[in-house]
Image (cartoon, rainbow, N blue to C red):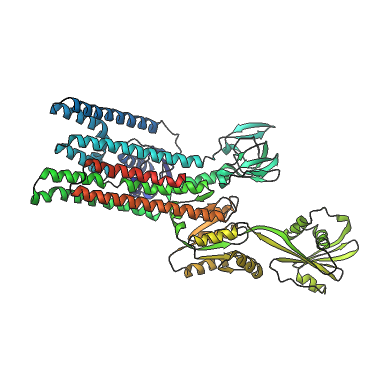
């Protein structure tokens, strides 16, 4: 049984990792995933004792975070625990800081009795650090010794025992201030990402009994008609049946230029209607709408952790016990040989404060968190930080052709008339002959002709399967089709060797000319391929079901390294596996496609990338990354965001480890004191957190 719990008020990445691990270790739980962005815990319970497991989960969460409220996703949210907790923390910090300043001022003006000094400092310490010490004691009782609460408690209590009372209180004060700002940074980061994806509609004005009724989007059925006024967000996907307007699509595509829509156009939920009133016939229920899917994709992205993120979590688990053991050795072994027990204990306590791994544990998940938000702002949905990190290591990109590199729309690109005929005559004969056909080729010919055809003049229409059309136009037999039709009618024609679909035209027994129809290459395809290679991609390959000549033409124009043509969906999977076996340098293989036939290949690739926000639902479901527009250049943006995020992650690791390494050595030799220790812990953590948020703000 799958259950989701709300962990209201959870902001600590380290605590969330510990909660995820401990819940996962429960006998009745097979899967445990904490999503810090949504503040949720999702579990698979393989037992009928669900209430017992629920109680165990609540106990685990509250053992780490007593102020976090735990309740099932289906329950109604209760209270304002988070707001109340924040208010208490601020009041405690202010009170503690004021008492600390009073002591400093009084100590400089008057000579206070030792007892009075101790009372003021102990009172200040209890106000500031009671919760930290209490958590440490509770965790020790439960067998969880090595965490930041333990480190801060033992170092500050130890400072009191050796007479460093002022330092003990100062360390706790600055630690709590640092923790407050860290949590504030995480909350603001979450808020920024939530605002970026604030496309959830609040209401829908549905027409019932001839009048608009305001209801929740979930209450609207497929086929019903909704109205959207200027300035309102479109609540559901549908087709415009009345009105015209410009839509702000930035939340979905990242594009600033408004999109014009009118009757017959498909519109997506989440877009904002800028002017005019639109009547829209709903085509998808809310749960299947674009806005709903995007929200779900982004919200759940944090549950799939990157390898670096997982490594840091494991590293912190072994690192903390190691430094505690070293601190103990530092405090008790040197005095045996050098004496001065109090000095070495002081050094070991400083060492403990410095060693807190907060900077790494906080900043690495937050960097990926911000990177996913930055990508979504640009119209790129990454389903997990593991895929964001994988985008750094792409060595081979495999593209589908139609709808990915090309527009997937057939257009007349060239008309080649025979001697004695004009381009207009060739197109006119073809358009009149094709006027009764619904074939995509026929539609492209009629679109290029651009005039109304007189069907009265057309008779004897005969569609010859696999060849073309034979008709009578104004008493003349006209043949429009491929080379097979020309040969069957014994017409002497000149075959074209150009890439594309060739439509030959003949009147009676005379060859009139050829119309070349091709699928137009997207404007940014060539630049996207070039930019990907500049970013480190070693090989760009195209797979298509089209014929060899068309595939060759497209591959040569886009400067692709390889292409494979005339492939069925299962053959595309075979080719992908072949390319994967050739990819021996350890890089990732990415496949970019848009159609329902691409779903198997998207699922098979290391990184599946679905092209287009209104592409096949199956393709989007199977993909790891979704590009919300039909532009291949969005993949380049995704790679750039991934590389920028990875650079921030590396910076945080280097900053955190190098600063801590330096201060650990200085602390061990007695050069760094408690004040420097506070900076190396809280200060470095804040620097790393702020650095992580650069990914979101850039």
Give how far across and how far down residue 558 sits, in percent.
60, 64
Residue 461 in the image: above or below residue 10:
below
Residue 675 visible to an observer of this rendering: yes
Residue 244 or 467: which is nearer the viewer? 244
Residue 134 visible to an observer of this rendering: no
| Residue 114: quarter of image | top left
| Residue 574: quarter of image | bottom right
Give how far across and how far down residue 580 sits, in percent.
48, 67
Left or right: 667, with 437 as reference point = left
Count how many numbered circles sit on residues in the image: 0
Residue 468 or 688: which is nearer the viewer? 688
Left or right: 198, with 276 as reference point = left
Residue furthest front as drawn: 109
Residue 109 or 256: which is nearer the viewer? 109
Residue 318 or 8: which is nearer the viewer? 318
Q: Residue at horizontal 76%, vertical 71%? A: 483
Give how far across and how far down residue 664 sits, in percent.
23, 49
Give how far across and how far down residue 528 sits, in percent.
56, 58
């Amino acid at each position: 049984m799958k259950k989701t719990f709300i962990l209201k008020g959870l902001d600590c990445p380290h605590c969330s990792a510990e909660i995820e691990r401990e819940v996962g270790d429960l006998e009745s739980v097979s899967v445990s995933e904490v999503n810090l962005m949504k503040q949720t815990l999702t579990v698979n319970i393989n037992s009928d004792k669900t209430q017992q497991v629920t109680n165990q989960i609540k106990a685990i969460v509250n053992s780490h975070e007593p102020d976090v409220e735990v309740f099932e996703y289906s329950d109604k949210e209760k209270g304002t625990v988070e707001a109340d907790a924040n208010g208490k923390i601020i009041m405690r910090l202010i009170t503690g800081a004021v008492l600390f300043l009073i002591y400093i001022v009084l100590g400089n003006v008057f000579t206070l009795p030792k007892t009075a000094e101790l009372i003021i400092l102990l009172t200040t310490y209890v106000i500031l650090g009671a919760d930290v010490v209490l958590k440490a004691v509770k965790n020790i009782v439960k067998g969880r010794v090595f965490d930041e609460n333990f480190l801060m408690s033992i170092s500050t209590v130890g400072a009191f025992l050796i007479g460093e009372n002022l330092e003990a209180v100062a360390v706790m004060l600055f630690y709590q201030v640092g923790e407050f700002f860290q949590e504030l940074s995480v909350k603001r980061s979450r808020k920024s990402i939530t605002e970026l994806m604030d496309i959830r509609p609040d209401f829908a004005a549905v027409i019932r009994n001839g009048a608009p009724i305001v209801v929740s989007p979930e209450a609207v059925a497929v086929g019903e008609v909704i109205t959207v006024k200027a300035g309102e967000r479109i609540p559901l996907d549908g087709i415009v049946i009345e009105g015209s307007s410009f839509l702000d699509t930035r939340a979905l595509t990242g594009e600033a230029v408004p999109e014009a829509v009118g009757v017959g156009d498909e519109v997506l939920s989440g877009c904002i209607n800028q002017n005019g009133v639109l009547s829209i016939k709903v085509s998808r229920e809310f749960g299947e709408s674009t806005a709903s899917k995007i929200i779900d994709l982004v919200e759940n992205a944090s549950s799939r952790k990157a390898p670096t993120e997982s490594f840091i979590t494991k590293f912190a688990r072994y690192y903390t016990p190691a430094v505690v053991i070293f601190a103990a050795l530092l405090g008790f072994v040197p005095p045996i040989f050098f004496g001065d027990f109090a000095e070495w204990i002081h050094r070991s306590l400083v060492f403990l404060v410095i060693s807190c791994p907060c900077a790494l544990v906080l900043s690495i998940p937050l960097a990926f968190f911000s990177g996913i938000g930055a990508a979504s702002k640009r119209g790129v949905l990454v389903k997990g930080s593991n895929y964001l990190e994988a985008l750094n290591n792409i060595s081979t990109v495999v593209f589908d052709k139609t709808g990915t590199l090309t527009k997937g729309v057939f257009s007349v690109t060239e008309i080649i008339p025979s001697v004695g005929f004009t381009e207009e005559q060739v197109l006119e004969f073809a358009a009149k002959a094709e006027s009764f056909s619904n074939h995509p080729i026929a539609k492209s010919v009629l679109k290029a002709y651009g005039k109304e055809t007189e069907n009265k003049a057309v008779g004897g229409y005969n569609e010859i399967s696999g060849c073309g059309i034979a008709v009578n136009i104004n008493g003349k037999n006209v043949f429009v089709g491929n080379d097979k039709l020309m040969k069957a009618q014994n017409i002497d024609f000149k075959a074209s060797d150009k890439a594309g679909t060739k439509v030959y035209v003949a009147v009676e027994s005379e060859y009139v000319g050829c119309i070349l129809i091709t699928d137009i290459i997207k404007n940014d395809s060539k630049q996207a391929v070039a930019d990907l290679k500049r970013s480190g991609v070693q090989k760009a390959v195209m797979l298509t079901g089209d014929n060899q000549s068309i595939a060759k033409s497209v591959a040569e124009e886009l400067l692709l390294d390889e292409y494979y043509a005339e492939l069925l969906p299962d053959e595309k999977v075979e080719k992908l596996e072949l390319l994967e076996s050739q990819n021996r340098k350890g890089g990732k293989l990415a496949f970019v496609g848009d159609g329902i036939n691409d779903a198997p290949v998207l699922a098979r690739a290391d990184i599946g990338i679905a092209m287009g926000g209104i592409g096949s639902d199956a393709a989007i479901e199977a993909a790891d990354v979704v590009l919300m527009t039909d532009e291949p250049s969005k993949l380049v943006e995704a790679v750039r965001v991934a590389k920028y995020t990875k650079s921030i992650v590396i910076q945080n690791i280097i900053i955190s480890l190098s600063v801590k390494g330096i201060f650990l050595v200085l602390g061990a030799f007695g050069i760094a004191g408690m004040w420097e220790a506070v900076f190396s812990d809280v200060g470095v953590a804040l620097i790393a957190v702020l650095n992580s948020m650069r990914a979101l703000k850039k």
